[in-house]
């Protein structure tokens, strides 16, 4: 089954790019510098920041539906990031190199299934979960720090 990994929209974060520290701090956002690579995964560009690159560290509500699974956590956005558009079936390297928690949700945003896998073996788990017609979408999380990484949907049939 073909799937599509979705990056976060760049437009959500562009108003923060280049803002002074006081402006960011007033919104609970910190400007940080990547001290190693990999280690600072951007949720917009779906790549790891290069050592020395500037990112924004901010709170993001990745599961905003009013259910018991409503959730948020800190994420990194490379300052000035361009939104990634992976091809159907493509898994970006930023995901392939991490231990991932995969969570399946139905159309009512209730969790139906969850598992953990190395990113290098992510495709079979995505395929298994999306085979269930009750699954509407998947969320990928970096398992060790536990933060949101990306969303997975069924790819449009062409």
Image: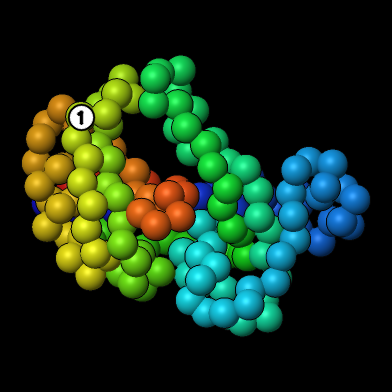
Viewer-nearest residue: 18 or 37? 37
For label 1, the crowd category at 10 Å Cα-Cα, with few meaning under 14, some 14 to 19 and many 20 or more, is: some
Whole-percent x, y for residue 73 in the image: 54, 42
User: Exactly how many numbered labels are in the figure?
Assistant: 1
Q: Position of residue 157 (x, y in %)?
A: 18, 47
Q: How is the image coloured?
A: rainbow
Residue drawn at x 23%, y 52% is: 116
Task: Judge whether residue 117 can be spotted in this image.
Answer: yes
Residue that label 1 marks: 112
x 10%, y 47%: residue: 128
Q: Outermost residue toward the front?
A: 144
Q: Residue 39 vs residue 126: left or right?
A: right
Residue 79 can be seen in this image:
no
Q: Nearer the viewer, residue 15 or 87?
A: 15
Q: Is residue 10 left or right of residue 143?
A: right
Badge 1 element: strand
Q: Residue at x 22, y 40 (%)?
A: 114
Question: Which residue: 40% across, 69% down?
Answer: 94
């Amino acid at each position: 089954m073909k799937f599509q990994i979705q990056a976060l929209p760049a437009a959500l974060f562009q108003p923060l790019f280049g803002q002074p520290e006081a402006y960011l701090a007033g919104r609970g956002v910190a400007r940080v510098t990547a001290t190693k690579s990999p280690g600072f995964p951007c949720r917009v560009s779906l790549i790891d920041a290069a050592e020395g690159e500037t990112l924004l560290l901010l709170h993001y509500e990745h599961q905003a539906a009013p259910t018991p699974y409503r959730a948020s956590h800190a994420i990194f956005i490379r300052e000035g990031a361009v939104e990634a558009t992976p091809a159907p079936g493509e898994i970006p390297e930023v995901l392939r190199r991490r231990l991932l928690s995969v969570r399946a949700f139905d159309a009512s945003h209730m969790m139906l299934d969850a598992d953990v896998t190395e990113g290098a073996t992510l495709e079979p788990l995505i395929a298994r979960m999306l085979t269930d017609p009750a699954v509407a979408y998947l969320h990928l999380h970096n398992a060790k720090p536990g933060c949101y990484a990306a969303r997975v949907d069924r790819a449009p049939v062409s």
